[in-house]
Amino acid sequence: MSVAAVIVAGGSGLRAGGEIPKQYQLIGGKPVIRWTLEAFLSHPGVNHVQAVIGDGHADLFAQATIGLDLPAPVTGGANRQDSCRMGIEACHVTHPQRVLIHDA
């Protein structure tokens, strides 16, 4: 079975505080989003991982994902529902039978 994971990371993370969105803040020496992406990339049951990022977060995402084998992220929409839809649509190239949605 073909499974895709959509990692929704488009939020601003304001409640967490800090100068950058929480998905890019470090925990254990790595950005939060990297922990998530590495978990799905290494899972034997997941065939495709697609990140959805916030507008203006491309540089933060690029820095957080150096060395990871990922397709280009898609920019999310005005709300979580739109962002999830955009992530699912970006998975069409792999024709997954199942799609998992996970918040970064």
Image (tube, rainbow, N blue to C red):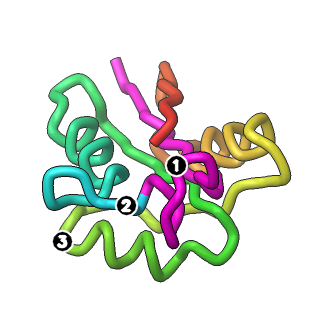
**Label 3 belongs to which residue?**
67
3 or 1: tag closer to the N-terminus: 1
Kindly indicate whether the residue at mark 1 contacts the one at mark 3 (C-beta within 8 angstroms): no
Separation of marks 3 and 2 at Cα, in angstroms = 18 Å
The residue depicted at 39 percent of the width and 26 percent of the height is 3
Separation of marks 2 and 1 at Cα, in angstroms = 9 Å
Helix, strand or loop status at disc 1 = helix
Q: Which residues are magenta?
A: 1-23
The residue depicted at 67 percent of the width and 44 percent of the height is 89
2 or 1: tag closer to the N-terminus: 1
**Label 2 belongs to which residue?**
25
Vertical comparison of 39 with 24: above or below: above
User: Which numbered mark, 3 or 2, is in the foreground of this view?
Assistant: 2
Q: Is residue 81 left or right of residue 97?
A: right
Q: Is residue 52 magenta?
A: no
**Label 1 belongs to which residue?**
16
Residue 39: x and y in percent read 22, 37
